Image (cartoon, helix red, strand yellow):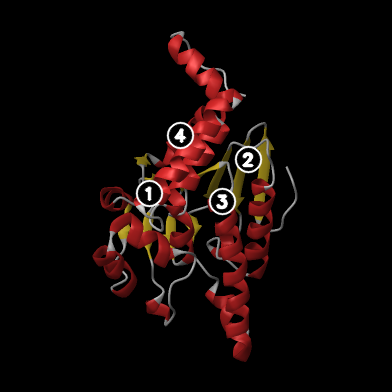
Amino acid sequence: MSQFQTIEFEQSGAIARITLNRPAAANGIDHVLGRELAQVAARCADDPALKVVTLTGSGRFFSAGGDLKAMAAQGGGAGAYVKGLAHDLHKAISSFARMDALLIVAVNGTAAGAGFSLAVTGDLVLAAESASFTMAYTRAGLSPDGGASYYLPRLIGLRRTQELMLNNRTLTAAEALDWGLLHRVVPDAELRAAADELAARFAAGPRHANANVKKLLLVSSDHTLEEQLAREAAFISAAADDADGQEGIAAFLGKRSPEFT
């Protein structure tokens, strides 16, 4: 296990596990956690052996978002401090979104503000039954960050995004699932096992094919139909020449389970 002040990080084979670890501060993002999250995300993105990264929080919170106490302590320098936090958080989110490995987020408790923003960036998002979700930015006189204004309209539409950002509605895990923010809700005691089981399944899967799914979906809203069709054709033809693609085709035709590299 590598050493960070505010994050627990461990890697086993093709799977890496990240745990936000400031439980006494509700896993609030201060300058240390923001910097370390950016560092660990870049590390995961640069590792060709990784297929899956899981992200969760320690204690009762996934993350309460930006650490307001740390912001207030800056006095007249709060703006510069928050800009630095946002810079590091956004570097982390960009790395997670563009890395080949899948990101599985396991929301173990309250996800508020930037914690909410971070949670929904996962390629697959699980939540404990007791988890809750609230933007809460405008309640503190702030506007959203962490990619919320990018991801939420795409996931749930404009009107529901406005409800979350302007009215600061709090969603239960069941409501978040119904709205389309999550993939699955599980009993609290089963969250870690469910995330590990999912990670193991994808660690045995085709890395490049899964990475291509991420890449295609990331840009699908920005391309014309023809541009996206061209991108799909390029990716699937490259996959057909890849060892995993050849193994997958052979296994399908041979009616056996594939053994991806």
C-alpha separation, residue under disc 4 versus residue under disc 2: 15 Å
Check disc 3 and give the amino acid type: Arg
Residue 83 appears in view: yes
C-alpha separation, residue under disc 4 versus residue under disc 3: 24 Å
Q: Nearer the viewer, mark 4 or mark 3?
A: 3
Mark nearer the N terminus (1 vs 3): 3
Where 80 sits versus 202, above or below? below
Name the residue at 42% across, 79% down. Answer: 140
User: Which residue reaches farthest top?
Assistant: 254
Mark nearer the N terminus (1 vs 4): 4
Name the residue at 60% across, 70% down. Answer: 87
Q: Residues within 10 Å of mark 3 (few under 14, many from 20)?
A: some
Mark nearer the N terminus (4 vs 2): 2
C-alpha separation, residue under disc 1 versus residue under disc 3: 22 Å
Where 243 sits versus 222, above or below? above
Label ID, residue 98: 3
According to the picture, the residue beneath numbered tag 1 turns out to be 226
Name the residue at 44% across, 15% down. Answer: 252
Q: Nearer the viewer, mark 2 or mark 1?
A: 1
Residue 239 shown left or right of residue 80 in the figure: left
Label ID, residue 194: 4
Q: Secondary structure at mark 1?
A: helix
C-alpha separation, residue under disc 2 versus residue under disc 3: 16 Å
Check disc 2 and give the amino acid type: Ala
